[in-house]
Amino acid sequence: ADVRRASITPDQICELVTAFYKRNYIEGLFLSSAVFGSPNKTMELLYQTVLKLRKTYNFNGYIHLKGIPHADEDIILKAAKLADRMSYNIELPSESSLKLLAPQKTKQSLLLPMKTLKQAVDYETGNKMRRSIIPAGQTTQMIIGASPESDGQILKLTEALYRNMNLRRVYYSSYVPVVQSYKLPAVGAGLLREHRLYQADWLIRFYGFNVDEICGENDNLPAEYDPKCAWALRYMHLFPVEVNTAPLETLLRVPGIGAKSAYKITEA
């Protein structure tokens, strides 16, 4: 849903969402908008929409709300108490690329609200309060291939976001050319590159790898092998592994053994 058009009011969106929800067409709402008038005005419209959904229309389904960069902190926190998840899209992996392709956004305008939400969640957690702010956490998204950053640089940023902002997910979207511009490459990144980044992301989150093990800062992930297999080929001196005695963290690094299998092996 998009509230940027003046002809679409918060009530109209609420009526549409609840009608679809009652018919079992949807399980939740992903609410986003371009800037309409000003960041604060747009964020206020988003907040009013979510507030009406929860309080007036008694909608208890899932709500993912896209935050508006440059909006005031108090509006962000009010909205966060009503949404299940919020996200601020990084869009591009470096500040120089943001200045070139998305000058309306800055690194600070994206990271500051992320930090604000993290601090609010940390406060509730530290004081053993009932989690009232974005219980499903934060996410972000990056466009891959529209700017010259390597996979290593992208993954370094990803690792820092997981570590410093406690993000639940980083999404990667392969650049697909739609219009011609001297600022943009004529060829897209390709879905295989996007897939390899998701595989590397998975290794960072669930398999105990760090970026330096997976990919050099100025390098791209190999296309011919998945990142885990590529790592194993570089560290062949660590193999073979004796599965009957190897600890869990070692089993997790064996190509072909996933997390569930590794746990089953250690239990056996």
Image (cartoon, helix red, strand yellow):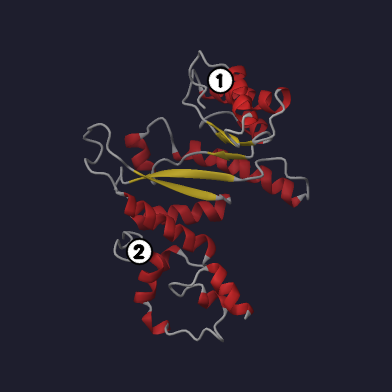
Query: Residue 15 vs residue 178: left or right?
Result: right
> Given the image, on which type of amino acid does mark 1 rest?
Lys
Q: Which residue is mark 1?
A: 41
State the residue lying farthest toward the front.
23
Callout 2 secondary element: loop
Quarter of the image where one finds residue 197: bottom left
Horizontal side of 12 relative to 211 (left or right) equals right
* Above or below for 218 versus 248: above
Q: Which image quadrant for residue 146?
A: top left
Are the residues tagged 2 and 1 within 8 Å (C-beta)?
A: no
Q: Position of residue 255 (x, y in %)?
A: 43, 73
The answer to whether residue 126 of the structure is visible from this angle is yes
Tell me residue 23's x, y (percent).
62, 29
If you read the primary sequence from the N terminus, does the residue marked by circle 2 or circle 1 appear first? 1
Measured along the vertical axis of the image, is residue 21 above or below residue 193? above
Percent coordinates x, y for residue 159 in the rendering: 48, 56
Judge whether residue 74 can be spotted in this image: no
Seen in the image, is 204 located left or right of residue 225?
right
Q: Please tell me in which quadrant of the rendered image residue 150 appears.
A: bottom left
Residue 216, labelled with which disc?
2
